[in-house]
């Protein structure tokens, strides 16, 4: 049953947070929901709306003024949000530690909107060489066509990025760790350089989720989540979020509205539902992943485990300095082997399914080849790279599955 939704309710959902001092776990359980307003339902219902009708011309004028004053949660037209979207936007803004959040229909749509919001023809972007492939493709194909140049940099660059900044550099786009090759970047050092030269720092923060890396405490201006991953957490919805500082907000908002970006109410609802259990799931992903990573590191077929939380893994020291936890996604570099052996290994696994995406409750595997796209950094390994997502299964069963697989290598 959906209780009638009024603009008052929307206001109260997206209004001044009453949860400023709550621990994250408590916020995840209680934040941005108000059962009293929906006839007692525990979760804010799915609100389906294109048209929002106004009570009068005066009502319409008042809402317009509220929008002009940048008030959150104003019901105006479905594309600009409903109580369903306002609740998730407020949740993510709170968790990331930013000013406001807007949603897009996929993580990729959110990445490219956050990137494009700050550039015009003639501008220049710096992008980490380990960035998510489709984001890279957008920069080199579409943005290049509009006269916006992108230079890729070695993810290990840190403060050395200063040398690559040009007078027309507007955005430094970071993803840390890279979701395919897991280099951890020195975000505070990069952000300090970028800001000295008037550039914005846009970060894809999907790997750590808003729980394990606080982008705005490390100098980031805009943070993106592929909510498709851990926030939804069940591999059954596509969604992206863009969260910004107050300073960057007008540019983000104007770009998102001008492009008509929005997200369907069912996907938004599923993401908000997934968010309720995020801290519990991530804790388990991390524990399982650490156990599997330790085991993998001791196998003779393994050249290197790329999991920043594992001592000895590349980026471990930076991860320890800046992150408060690790998720379940890691890289595994095998010693060089025949292509058919790799296929036999992947195909023999029963619990690790072959498929794109990650962040759901289940384990996944995907061979990767970082070589063809690298231009600013050398990929140092000769053997094959495999990406593993460690799910919520028993780690003993996952290890037994991998052990069987290694027997076929
Ligand atoms: C999956 C992913 C995206 C894109 O998300 P979609 O919802 O699949 O479009 C963006 N960035 C990273 C790091 C990802 O892993």
Image (spheres, grey):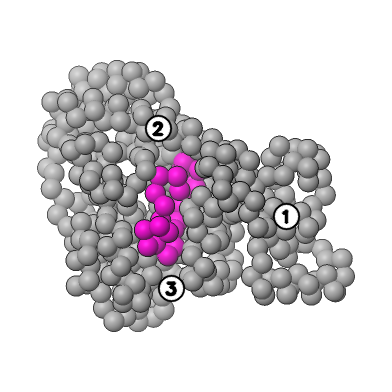
Quadrant occupied by the C terminus = top left
First in sequence: mark 1 vs mark 3: 1
2 vs 3, front mark: 2
Label 3 near label 2: C-beta < 8 Å? no
Q: Where is residue 285, by image quadrant?
A: top left
Query: Among all residues in the image, which is located at the extreme front?
Result: 21
Can residue 286 be seen from the camera position used here?
yes
The picture places residue 390, in percent across and down from the top left corner, at: 36, 31
Q: Is residue 87 above or below residue 153?
A: above
The picture places residue 273, in percent across and down from the top left corner, at: 60, 39
Q: CA distance from mark 2 to mark 1?
A: 34 Å
First in sequence: mark 2 vs mark 3: 3
Q: Residue at x 25, y 74 (%)?
A: 165
The picture places residue 157, in percent across and down from the top left corner, at: 20, 61
Asked whether mark 2 lies closer than 8 Å to ligand 1, one says no
Residue 221 is one of the magenta-drawn residues: yes
The picture places residue 312, in percent across and down from the top left corner, at: 18, 38
Q: Secondary structure at mark 3?
A: loop
Residue closest to the eye, 205 or 362: 205
Residue at the disc numbered 1? 12
Q: Is residue 16 left or right of residue 115?
A: right
Quadrant occupied by the N terminus = top right
Can residue 112 be seen from the camera position used here?
no
Crowding near the residue tagged with mark 3, few <14, some 14–19, many ≥20 C-alpha atoms within 10 Å: some
**Residue 285: numbered disc:** 2
Residue at the disc numbered 3? 118
Q: Which residues are magenta?
A: 210-232
Q: Is residue 98 left or right of residue 291?
A: right
């Amino acid at each position: 049953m959906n209780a009638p939704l009024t603009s008052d309710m929307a206001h109260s959902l997206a209004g001044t947070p009453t949860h400023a001092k709550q621990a994250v776990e408590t916020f995840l359980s209680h934040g941005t929901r108000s059962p009293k307003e929906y006839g007692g339902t525990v979760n804010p219902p799915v609100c389906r709306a294109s048209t929002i009708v106004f009570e009068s011309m005066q009502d319409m004028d008042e809402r317009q003024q509220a929008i002009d004053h940048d008030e959150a949660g104003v019901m105006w037209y479905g594309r600009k949000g409903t109580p369903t979207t306002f609740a998730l936007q407020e949740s993510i803004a709170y968790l990331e530690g930013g000013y406001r959040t807007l949603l897009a229909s996929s993580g990729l749509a959110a990445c490219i909107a956050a990137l494009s919001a700050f550039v015009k023809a003639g501008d220049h972007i710096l992008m980490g060489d380990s960035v998510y492939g489709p984001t890279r493709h957008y920069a080199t194909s579409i943005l290049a066509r509009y006269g916006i140049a992108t230079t890729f940099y070695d993810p290990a660059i840190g403060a050395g990025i200063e040398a690559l900044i040009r007078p027309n550099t507007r955005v430094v786009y970071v993803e840390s760790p890279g979701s395919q090759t897991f280099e951890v970047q020195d975000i505070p050092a990069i952000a300090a350089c970028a800001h000295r030269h008037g550039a914005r720092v846009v970060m894809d923060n999907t790997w750590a989720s808003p729980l394990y890396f606080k982008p705005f405490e490390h100098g980031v201006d805009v943070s993106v989540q592929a909510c498709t991953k851990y926030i939804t957490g069940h591999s059954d919805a596509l969604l992206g979020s863009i969260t910004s500082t107050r300073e960057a907000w007008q540019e983000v908002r104007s770009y998102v509205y001008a492009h008509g970006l929005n997200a369907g109410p069912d996907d938004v609802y599923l993401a908000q539902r997934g968010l309720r259990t995020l801290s519990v799931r991530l804790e388990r992903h991390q524990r399982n992943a650490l156990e599997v990573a330790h085991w993998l590191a001791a196998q003779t077929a393994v050249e290197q485990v790329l999991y920043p939380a594992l001592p000895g893994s590349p980026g471990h020291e930076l991860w320890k300095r800046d992150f408060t936890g690790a998720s379940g996604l890691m890289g595994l570099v095998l010693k060089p082997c025949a292509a058919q052996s790799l296929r036999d290994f992947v195909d023999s696994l029963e619990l690790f399914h072959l498929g794109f995406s990650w962040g759901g409750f289940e384990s996944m595997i995907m061979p990767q080849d970082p070589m063809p796209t690298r231009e600013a950094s050398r990929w140092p390994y000769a053997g094959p790279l495999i990406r593993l997502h460690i799910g919520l299964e028993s780690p003993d069963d996952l290890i037994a599955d991998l052990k069987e697989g290694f027997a076929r290598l």
